Image: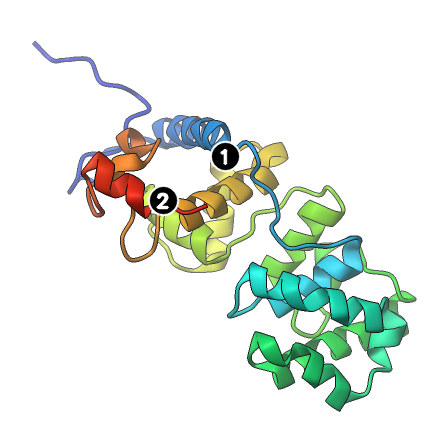
Amino acid sequence: MTRPTDPTAPAEPGRPGAETDLARTRRARRVDRMLAERYPDARCELDFTDPFTLLVATVLSAQTTDVRVNATTPALFARYPGPAELAAADPDELEEILRPLGFFRAKARAVQGLSQALVTRFGGTVPARLPDLVTLPGVGRKTANVVLGNAFGVPGITTDTHVLRLSGRLGYTTSEDPLVVERELGALLPRRDWTMACHRLIFHGRRTCHARRPACGACPVARLCPSAGIGEQDPQRAAALLKG
């Protein structure tokens, strides 16, 4: 007699094609609901007050932490509160403010360049369309979706390093191409949930499903994860790995 199977359960190890598209969609949505319970405070962890400050902060967050960006941007925006001021900034002074972030020369050029583009091409206003945002210096689809989702309320998939890693571990995609992951993850979730679902994946990646040693024994979605078992299984030792 064949035992009934859970249609939301992941594919068995070694059988990547065993899960149907419908089952994967149901599982992804169930995982998102469970992560929403685990991280009710999930949000963008960059401090911002408007689309411009979020755009600049997101560009600055490359290859550094949100904590470090949040420690640096108050002085930056006190000195240059808008695109016009940042566009006209003295490069040496701007670089000095951004020095704690690393790669400060490249970042100074990027944020000054995007500010100049905002002034000359968009009247000093951050555009609310992805095709316009990605024309700005230093702004790709990931940054554009962060701004659209959090400053304008336009749903988007943010393919940051945590979303890419967890999308693979959870069996949502076999690709590492951000464009492919954006498309495949977006197909699994309702469009209205895209922004918050990415926040929840990022929170989970930072706090539980770490890159090097995931805390599988303390993971709320381990039962639905094809990769469960790659990290620490003992509940007590796994709990000690949790962050935040």
Query: Which residue, given by chain and number where applicable, does mark 1 sit on?
Result: 39
Image quadrant where residue 240 sits: top left
Q: Quadrant of the N terminus?
A: top left
Residue placed at 48% from the left, 27% from the top?
Answer: 37
> In what element is the residue under mark 1?
loop
Q: Quadrant of residue 26?
A: top left
Q: Nearer the viewer, residue 211 or 30?
A: 211
Camera-nearest residue between 203 and 157: 203
Q: Which amino acid, by three-letter code, is at mark 1?
A: Tyr
Q: Is residue 101 above or below residue 192?
A: below
The x and y percentages for residue 47 are 68, 54
Where residue 217 sits: x, y (%)? Answer: 24, 37
Q: Give coordinates of residue 51: x percent, y percent.
A: 78, 55
Residue drawn at x 19%, y 40% as measured from the top left: 233
Dividing the picture into quarters, in which one does residue 194 lie? top right
Question: Count the marks: how many?
Answer: 2
- Provide the residue designation for mark 2: 242
The percent position of residue 195, horizontal first and vertical second, equals 60, 42
Q: Residue at x 64, y 53 (%)?
A: 146
